[in-house]
Amino acid sequence: MDWQTLEAAVDTAVFATWQEAVRLSFLKNGVVDPVRPPRDIKAILHHPGLDGALTLGGGMLTSVAASRHYLVIERAKYPGLIIRAQDRVRATERPGMPWYEVSKVNDRHSGIIILELGEA
């Protein structure tokens, strides 16, 4: 089994277990972008504990800033999705449906897109 096949199998299992509904709202110059309408998707919204530790599985542990959230999107499920810094994410399944602002977009992974989020 090659690494891409293994990666896809792991991604499928992780997304099936941890994804939740979120709304992506796209902005241009601080206002709603009429070319990119809001989109409801399923993704993994993660906020590390207050100690800043993020468990990656298999005993791996990394340190991240405690004030940051991360949204992990399954690339194959949403082809053509373009997200930019300053777009917004709403956690529609969480109490109070909080908003987050996209601060960074990492789309260099083969199977996922990772957004770094701050409080909006």
Image: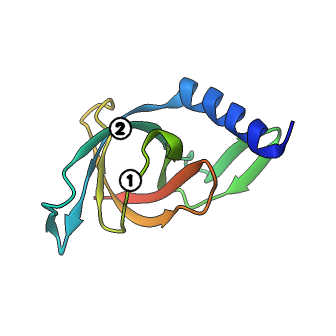
Q: Amino acid at mark 1?
A: Leu
* Quarter of image, res 94: top left
Place of residue 44 in the rendered image (x, y in percent of width and height, measured from the top left): 49, 39
Residue 119 in view in this figure: yes
Viewer-nearest residue: 97 or 110: 110
Label 1 with label 2: CB-CB less than 8 Å: yes
Viewer-nearest residue: 86 or 37: 37
Residue 47 in view in this figure: no
Q: Amino acid at mark 2?
A: Ile
Place of residue 34 in the rendered image (x, y in percent of width and height, measured from the top left): 12, 60
Place of residue 24 in the rendered image (x, y in percent of width and height, measured from the top left): 29, 48
Q: Secondary structure beneath disc 1? A: loop
For label 2, the residue is: 41
Q: Is residue 32 left or right of residue 7?
A: left
Place of residue 3 in the rendered image (x, y in percent of width and height, measured from the top left): 81, 45
78 shown above or below 20: below
For label 1, the residue is: 81
